Image (cartoon, rainbow, N blue to C red):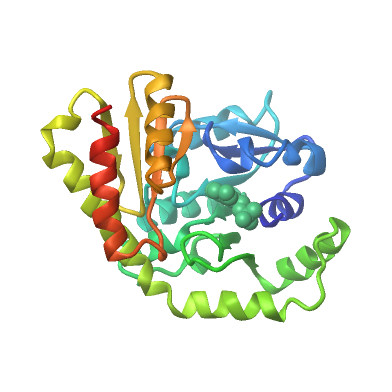
Amino acid sequence: MGNQISLLIHNSPGTEVITTSDSHIKNYEHGAASFLSRVQFREIDHKDGALNLDSIKSVYEKSKVHKPQIKTIAQENTHLASGGSIVSYNHLAEVYSFAKEIGINIHIDGARLWHAILGEGSTTNYGNISDSLTFCFSKALGAPIGSMLLGSKEFITEAREYRKILGGGMRQVGVIASMADKALDLRERILEDHQKAKDIFDFICEKQEFDGFFKAEYKNTNMIFLKFSDGANSQNFINNLEKEGVLSGLINDKTVRLVFHKDVSTDDMVHVKEKIYSSSLI
Ligand SMILES: Cc1ncc(COP(=O)(O)O)c(C=O)c1O
C-alpha cells in the first residue's frame, strides 16, 4: 500500500514510472499501479538492481514528444530479484540529482532497506535522496507485521487520505507499533543474518561436491540463491530439505532462495549445512 500510495501522489493517469523489469512494484502488486494510479511502467536495464543512469537519461529525452510523461523513478533497495543486492547510496544520490534536474520524483521501495543501510555502514541519509520511501518491519527487522511509508509532511498528509480511501486506516495499532519499535531498536542484529548467509555460502563454495548440481550466488545481505539446471532438481532439493526441517523457497522454477533471519540459531546453522550437503547428494 505504501508503494501504491506513493505512485498515487507522484503520478497522474497516463504518465509513467521508471523501474526494472523484475521489480516488486511492477510485478507483485497485482496490477495495482494500473488499477489505482492508471500509470504504466517503463523498464530500464539495471545491474544488480541499480538502474542505468544513461538509460534513464535517454528514455527521458525520448519521452519529450512521442512518449508518455515520466513522473517517477521507483527504485527497489535491496533488489530482491538480484539476490537481495544492495544498490549503493552513491548511485541513488546520482539518480536523485538527475531526477531533481528534470523535476521527477524518486520513490524507494526499501522493503529490505535496512540491509542496505547497515551493509553500507549506517551513515547514509535516505531522506536526502528520495521523495518517498517504504520499508518493512516484517522482513529484515523481524517484526511479525507492519510496513512504513516516509516522506515530507505534506506528502504524509496526502498519504493519510489515500490510506483511508484504500481501506488501510486502522485503530488499536499500538500493539503492532510496539513490535515495530522494538525491531527497529534491534536493527544492528541484521548484520548477523548477513554473516550467517556468508557462512553458508562459503561452506558451499568450499565443498567441491556441489559443483554441477547448482550454482550459488550471494550478494552481501541475508540471502543465497541456488541456481539449478532444471526445475525438477530445484523442487526435489526443496522437498528434501523440508523433510529435514529446513524450509526454503523457489524464486523461480530453477532458483531456490535461502533466507537467513533472527530465528536461525547457531545450532541451526550446523544443521542447515549438514542438510544442504545431504540433500544435494540425492
Ligand atoms: C521488494 C518488496 N517491496 C514491497 C513488498 C511489500 O511488502 P508488505 O506488503 O509487507 O508491505 C515486498 C514484500 O514481499 C517486497 O519484497
**Looking at the image, can residue 254 be seen?**
yes
How many numbered marks does the figure carry? 0
Say if 141 sits above or below 273 in the image. below
Q: Nearer the viewer, residue 247 or 99?
A: 247
Q: Nearer the viewer, residue 235 or 166?
A: 235
Give x and y (percent) for residue 138: 56, 62
Say if 206 sits above or below 4 in the image. above
- Residue found at x 55% / y 54%: 108
- Residue found at x 11% / y 32%: 208
Give x and y (percent) for residue 188: 37, 73
Instruction: Say which quadrant the N terminus sits in.
Output: bottom right
- Residue found at x 47% / y 54%: 97
Q: Nearer the viewer, residue 276 or 148?
A: 276
- Residue found at x 11% / y 41%: 206
Residue 199 located left or right of residue 82 = left
| Outermost residue, front side | 243
**Residue 5: quadrant of the picture:** bottom right
Instruction: Say which quadrant the C terminus sits in.
Output: top left
Residue 237 located left or right of residue 179 = left
